[in-house]
Image (cartoon, rainbow, N blue to C red):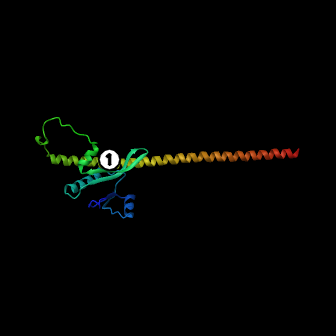
Amino acid sequence: MAKSAGKSLSIYAPSGRLVGLLHARGVPVTKTYSGFGEVPSDAQIHDITVHFVDRYMAGQLDYFGVVYMAFNSPGHQQAQTMTIMPLTDLIDHLTTRARAIWPWDLVFEDFLMAPSPEEIIASLAIMIMHTTIKACFLEAALSEHVARMLAMRNATKNAEDMIRDLTAEYNRARQTNITSELLDIISGIGVLR
């Protein structure tokens, strides 16, 4: 899709199975992050955020999105892309199209601000992006844990069903064997008389 739009795609990924899968499919990975736990530390997320904000502000980046496993319900997790930049798209997604109501007849320029509006917006952008990226990692970790929990629950249920079926089969075979032995004993008594 990026090639058809005349854009280049850069993929940044945590080290692990994903990188191997991408290499196997011939998809180049621009940078591999190592040393991440299940959820990266705040310092690691801050480094990622600042790196992409700097690239965006320098005009080297048109779009930044995070692909992660979204948790919808215990039985439904789905891969999803969250648009992080442009920041207006992220804010639009986070506020679900809510609209702020401005109660005064003043415009933004009528206020004296210290620090400058640009500095405030840059700081807010980093905070919003940091929180959103961390939320993506947390949601992906939650999805993985829930999927494992459901797999273990299903395996336990299947094992219990198998034990129940094998026990019933064993009891039928045992009862058949006892009945057969009783018939042999009764037949033997009838022959002796």
**Can the viewer see residue 132?**
yes
Please report the residue visible at 46 percent of the width from the left and 46 percent of the height from the top.
150
Please report the residue visible at 50 percent of the width from the left and 47 percent of the height from the top.
154
Most distant residue in the top direction: 103
The C terminus sits in image quarter: top right
* Residue in the foreground of this view, choosing between 189 and 4: 4
The N terminus sits in image quarter: bottom left
**Can the viewer see residue 16?**
no
* Residue in the foreground of this view, choosing between 100 and 164: 100
Please report the residue visible at 16 percent of the width from the left and 48 percent of the height from the top.
118
Residue under label 1: 135
Where is residue 158? Give x, y as percent: 54, 47
Most distant residue in the right direction: 193
**Relative to 185, is 160 on the left or the right?**
left
Where is residue 181? Give x, y as percent: 76, 47
Callout 1 secondary element: helix
* Residue in the foreground of this view, choosing between 66 and 123: 66
The mark tally for this picture is 1
Most distant residue in the front direction: 4
Where is residue 21? Give x, y as percent: 39, 60
Please determine whether, in this image, residue 5 is positioned above or below residue 175: below
Please report the residue visible at 40 percent of the width from the left and 48 percent of the height from the top.
77
**Relative to 38, is 91 on the left or the right?**
left
The quadrant in which residue 73 appears is top left
Mark 1 packing: few (<14 Cα in 10 Å), some, or many (20+)? some
**Relative to 151, is 128 on the left or the right?**
left
Where is residue 102? Give x, y as percent: 18, 37
As shown in the figure, which amino acid type bears the numbered disc 1? Ala
